[in-house]
Amino acid sequence: MIQREQAEKILKTVLQASTADETQVVLQSEDLCQTRFNNNWIHQHLFRETYSVEIKVIHQNRVGIATVNSLDEASLRKGVADAMHNASFVKPNPNLVSLPDPKPIREIDGINLNTLNLSDMDRADLVASMIDVAKVNHVDASGSFSNELRSIAVANSKGVMAYHAGNNLRIRSIMANGLQTGYSEAMATDVRDIDFVAVAKDALWKSKLKAEESLTLELGSYDTIFEPQAVADLIRFPGYIAFQGQSFLDGRSFMAKSMGQQVFDEKVTVYDDAYDARHIPMPMDAEGMPKQKVMIIENGIAKGVVFDHATAVRAGKESTGHATQGRRGGPNPSHLIIAPGQSSIEEMIRNTKRGVYVTRFHYTHCPEPMQVIATGTTRDGTFLIENGEIVARLKNLRYTDSMIRVFANVDSLSKQQYLVKDWWFTFTMLVPAMKIRDFTFTGNTTF
Amino acid sequence: MKDQIQEILALAKRLGATYADVRYTKQMSRPLVMRNGQVDHFTVSEDKGYGIRVIVDGGWGFASTPSHDPKDLEVAVKRAISIAKASARCKIRDIELTPLTPVEDCKKVKVVQDPFKVSVDDMSALLRQCHDAMVQVPEIKVTSGMITMQNMEKTFASSEGSWIEQEITRTGANIEAYARGEGDVQRRSYANGRSAGYETIEMLDLVPRASKLAKEAAELLKAPECPKGRTTLILGGDIAQLQVHESCGHPIELDRVLGSEDTYAGKSFLTPDLYGKGYRYGSDVVNMTADATIEGGNGSFFYDDDGVPAQRTTIVDKGIFKNYLTSRETAGNFGLTSNGTNIAMNWANIPLIRMTNINLEPGDWSEEEMIRDTKEGVLVDTPKSWSLDDKRVNFHFGGEIAYEIKDGEIVRMVKNPAYTAITPEFWGSCDAVAGKEKGEWEVWGNTNCAKGEPVQVVHPGHGAAQVRFRNVKVGVGE
């Protein structure tokens, strides 16, 4: 990882080398350990060290960018020269937005030493503890354990100089009981906050639940209970399609014509808060702007979207600190949170006369962005509920439904929130479990 | 560099590695992105470093570093060894690689016009012409265009004695037009690329396409919704190539079949018990190949990252499943040798089994004959969305545009088409593949194939033409 002092030296080298009207430099580093296992053995195991330095110059209303991954002075100077060279070819854009002025950032200590000091063998031992659960119970364990340490440093010629480093880990577990599977996951900054055996046992429990046979559900609309990782995949679509400033300004977001209006059920409140200690906290974005808490949906009413500097200027607003490096589609939410409700998963099941229980989704997509019509299939534990009890395992199902309609049909939310990622790894989110009325299943799989 | 790499391999062996390889890659890319007629950004990226893979005590270890400093490389070797020993803590058998004769070779993709030497003025002028053509249509509110080029120099060396240098250049483009109407936004787009130089861009004929796409996007605003129900479906080449990618290319990746990708990308319905048993994947007219040797194919290369030469392999022959994509680690499960598809995105990542050019081989129909022969159906083109279950059985695809066919003729444009099916039933219902006429069959460049944890994005190719399926469920939400 690149420490603050070294990072600032690199950033200053770039700024001093540039003769552009304005210059921005973003330095990112990542140390990633990833341990993957399947059929009760570790089959992939790696350490990856990467850096990137993105240099953006604005000169005479022209933008040029260069990215390098070498940190020596000659490479950095070449990067500046390349960016200037690139800018010289570009036609001036009179509407170009200037780089942001510095703003105070409330810093966060993101490094957890317990996680930082995990050795390669420590990781293997933790995975082995999960595989042992599988072996004792005559099932096969698969999963993925990542432990990442990241830093980001941003400076610009208008005085921005910001740095943050942090680490986190995530464990995902699938237990295969023959053809029946169960899934569980956990994510934290401190390795001591994850009970690896408990994660394995949770996946195991689901793999054994009603495992005798899988029924084929008659297609239609059902009251449906979603575990938090499934909720993450449902809110992901509004997240990247509708809750961000670029699509809002382009009119490609349903939020563009709905501000102040009731769009979701009144039980639904969605906001973005990078300082929430239960999340993976982050004080700044890829322009060095401080993260702001943004209320997106409050009691079902559309309240706001997230902005980077350029989209904020165009919208006559302030940046909310949601610039994304390397993503050219504009800003994005970074720390989505769905406010909790009053229920629990057990209570949701008890209160369901006939419905479906979904553990997680696979490969979701959005054929119709304006209405946020999404589709995807369930996996690793889909169950039929009757008269307040799980009565059978179901073959996996395809859903196709509008996420606007889905979040307007919320029956209940759990009191407890969980830190999860969606299947695509787009967002890390803090979300409750959720029960939806009349969720639409449109297809069956054969397993 | 040769001495440095040989020293890494020697150190790995001294530290107990029974196998080691080193991959050095240097990748340059230079995307030019235009948005609404203005250059949004023009970037030059350079990314280089070393990936070191070892087998120790029967377990895999991998470490990568962007540093060229011998001390940092030594640290990386030791880290790879440490990781391999930790992997061996949880093994059920020792890793075994299928035999390979060591190779010394140096190869380079044929490039007529070096894309890195093309003036930015020329590139931006071309994209601006596309924009200008699109905004002639009043309903077009947002346009974008991008020209991409990538050059990768790769050196592979193994403890078995291979030394392979290869240089791959890829060039491509995409253009998009968004039409906005009352409460509706419709997109038309085109994307393609090849393993070749800037001559690719000239072949793509972007400006006339831009004009056509814009008109279609505007027309879609007024078009009725695609009819729902079971009908005959004809896929245009653009969406057929993605259908091949998702419902054939991914399920034949043997690492996925064996469970390596379970937590993320999933497994496959083409389970090992089906191999060599004459399993019917599709109808008699369905023939599929994996061919990394097609000149200009986006998924072409000379050697994979096990050092295995690029090959052409029959995947489906007259509807019968024949072969997986394999690596040196996985091929031995079936008593085979690798067919050379183990590829890493770059130096920083481990190789995984990836698609090369996965092709639906041309048939003996023309598109015109296919339409004329269809009493009732829809012709869908250009993927808008795609979703498959974790064994690639049930899928749902959305297209950007569709045309209703009645009594052998296209009668009207319809919007928001989607279709859903079960993979072997779908390919089993295929009764016509085009390719008879010049230009119908082509190798499309796919620029965004993601797999693995951490996610690696690679660039396969897919030969495809128009293809017809019977009795398919069509319609969003049905």
Image (cartoon, rainbow, N blue to C red):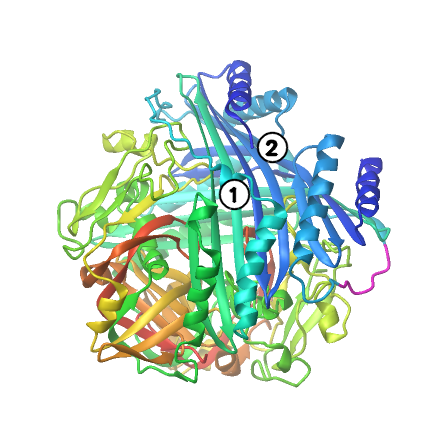
Mark drawn on residue B234: none
Q: Is residue B59 left or right of residue B10?
A: left
Q: Is residue B445 left or right of residue B387?
A: right
Q: Is residue A329 left or right of residue B345?
A: left
Q: Is residue A374 magenta?
A: no
- Disc 2 marks a residue whose amino acid type is Asn
Q: Quarter holding the C terminus of chain B?
A: bottom left
Query: Residue visible at 48% across and 62% down?
Result: A173
SS for callout 1 = strand
The answer for which chain carries disc 1 is A
Residue underneath mark 2: A69
Residue underneath mark 1: A148
Residue A241 percent location from the top left of the image: 32, 50
Q: Quadrant of residue A43?
A: bottom right
SS for callout 2 = loop
Q: Quarter holding the N terminus of chain B?
A: top right
State the extent of the magenta-drawn residues as a range. B96-102
Query: Marks 2 and 1, how far apart in space?
Result: 19 Å
Other-residue count near label 1 (Cα within 10 Å), few / some / many at <14 / 14–19 / ≥20: many
Query: Residue visible at 63% across and 53% down?
Result: A45
Q: Is residue A360 left or right of residue A350?
A: right
Seen from the viewer's position, the closer of residues A183 and A99 is: A183
- Which tag, 2 or 1, sits closer to the chain's start? 2
Q: Is residue B437 above or below residue A43?
A: below
